Amino acid sequence: MKKINITLVLFFGILLVSSHLFAQSPAQLAKGKQFIIDADIPWQEIGPGVKRKIMSYDETMMMVKIDFQKGGIGAPHKHVHTQMSYVESGVFEVTIADKKQTLKKGDGYYIPSNVMHGAVCIEAGVLIDLFTPMREDFVK
């Protein structure tokens, strides 16, 4: 009888943990991730020719990987978060406030809080975005 009860307890414990993990979105699973394995993180489609991965975050900061196909657009927008971005690959025309700059692999940019900005992908590539504080709207 004890053996059956222990087996049932283990079974239901595993079931409970599994159901909790499956109920979380990929972005929620990234919270506090210390070792970030790119291949383990699924892409999220966010628009025509644009997809992202939430790499890791806590309440104070967030790292996001954005993949753009040629012609993909990061529509002009602003947010309260301070943002820095690194061009991992490709070529982008980035607009910050009233300034435009063409950036390529190895370049980066800084966006203060509440400043209008956007990007157009000239040559397919990837941006690594850092936000502070984290983007709560990305994990809902």
Image (cartoon, rainbow, N blue to C red):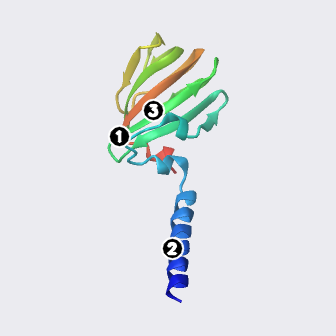
Instruction: Answer few, some or many: residues within 10 Å of disc 3's Cα (few below 14, many 20 plus, some between 14 and 19).
Output: some
Give yes or no for contact between labels 1 and 2 (Cβ–Cβ under 8 Å). no
Q: Amino acid at mark 3?
A: Lys
Please tell me how crowded label 1 is: few (under 14), some (14-19), or many (20+) other residues with Cα within 10 Å: some
Mark 3 — residue? 78
Q: Residue 117's x, y, as percent?
A: 46, 25
Question: Image point 61% across, 36% down: which residue?
Answer: 46
Q: Amino acid at mark 2?
A: Leu
Residue drawn at (46%, 38%) of the image: 55
Distance Cα–Cα, label 1 vs label 2: 36 Å
Q: CA distance from mark 1 to mark 3?
A: 17 Å
- In this view, which residue lies farthest toward the bottom? 1
Query: Identity of the amino acid at label 1?
Result: Met
User: Where is mark 1, residue-wise?
Assistant: 61
Q: Is residue 79 visible?
A: no
Q: Is residue 119 left or right of residue 59?
A: right
Judged left or right of residue 47, residue 36 is left
Q: Which residue is mark 2?
A: 10
